[in-house]
Each structure stands twice: as C-alpha cells, then as structure tokens.
Amino acid sequence: MTIGLAQSKDKQKIARLDTHISSLLLDECIRKGQIYVLKDDSIKNGGQNHRLRDPVVGVLRYSLFWQTIPFLDLLYIDEAYRSQGFGTQMMHEWETAMAACGYEYVMTSTQANEQAWRFYEKLGYCKVGSFFPPEQEAEEWMYLKRLRSRIEKSDNKILRRKCYA
C-alpha cells in the first residue's frame, strides 16, 4: 500500500470513487496537487492474486477554505479496505504535508447523520460550528484541527510558494 499525490494516469479510477466533482475540476485538482491516492498493487480477484499496476483504492481531496486553510473535501476508501487504518494513514500523510507547507490549521466537515464525525474527533478535530446547506436534510458540522504552532509570516509565504503552483 502506498499513499501519494494523484497523477493524471489515476484520473479514471479516482472519478469512479469520487463522483462529487466534474471531470474538469478533477483535472484541475490533480494538476494542483490537491488529491492524494491510496494504491494497492496486489488485488484478489476470483480467488487468485493478480498484480495490477498501482490501482487506486482510496482518495483524499482537499481545497483551500478562504484561500488560506486546507479543507478536506473528501476522504473515500474502497469498502474492501475500510477499518484497516488506511483512512487514518491518509489523513496523517495529508496533515504532515499541510504542516510542511506552513499551514497552522486544517478543516473538514461532515453531515450530522453520518458516522465520520467520530473518526475526525478521534484524530483530534474539534467541532467549531454547523449550518444547514440548501437541499440537505442533515446539519453540516464543521471541524478544525491545529497542526502546529504559528510560524513567522515570512517563512510561511516562502513555504506556500514551494507547495502550490
């Protein structure tokens, strides 16, 4: 199992797992380095082990809230790979990368009627608010996590330039 930034060759598999954005936006997210993928090169099919070339079995996609705070838009792990710690590993990989880019906080959200809030709270995320999005029956809970202490602004600008095109 490997976790890394998505590449254009991963797009078709990512699109099957992440049905929430258009093909054009998916291309842009891949180009900007805003998608991480979990890959497994050995998959069991029909009782036989078949080596496949880095199939994508998990997706983590983020954007920037207010253009300043990394916001986790999606974490999806294929059912066969759930409850094995891969979601936690993907989150740690992403949080580490965001800290290395100079970000002090990360955010995410989940619907109140979903179980994901337990996962995020277990990882140290704190509920900081909620709202009712249009055409959504459940309340959306917003979460925030502090990654590390504030660094000097000048250093932060330099790190961001290195991390984002």
Image (cartoon, helix red, strand yellow):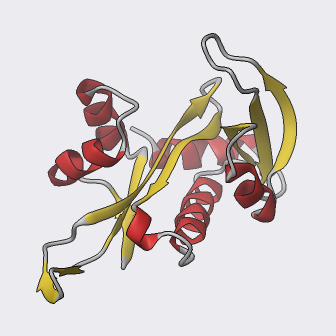
Quadrant the C terminus occupies: top left
Looking at the image, residue 100 sits to the left or right of residue 42; the answer is: right
Q: Residue furthest bottom?
A: 48
Q: Is residue 48 above or below residue 148?
A: below
Residue at 28% x, 62% y: name it. Answer: 56
Q: Residue furthest front?
A: 46
Image location of residue 42, percent across then percent down: 22, 83
Using the rendered view, name the quadrant where residue 66 is placed: top right
Q: Is residue 132 above or below residue 8?
A: above
Residue at 24% x, 29% y: name it. Answer: 23
Using the rendered view, name the quadrant where residue 55 is placed: bottom left
Looking at the image, residue 24 sits to the left or right of residue 117; the answer is: left
Q: Nearer the viewer, residue 30 or 139?
A: 139
Residue at 30% x, 25% y: name it. Answer: 22
Image location of residue 117, percent across then percent down: 74, 50
Quadrant the N terminus occupies: bottom left
Image location of residue 10, percent across then percent down: 21, 53
Using the rendered view, name the quadrant where residue 2 is placed: bottom left
Looking at the image, residue 4 sits to the left or right of residue 53; the answer is: right
Q: Nearer the viewer, residue 111 or 147?
A: 111
Q: Is residue 29 above or below residue 156?
A: above
Counting every numbered tag in the picture gives 0
Image location of residue 108, percent across then percent down: 67, 41
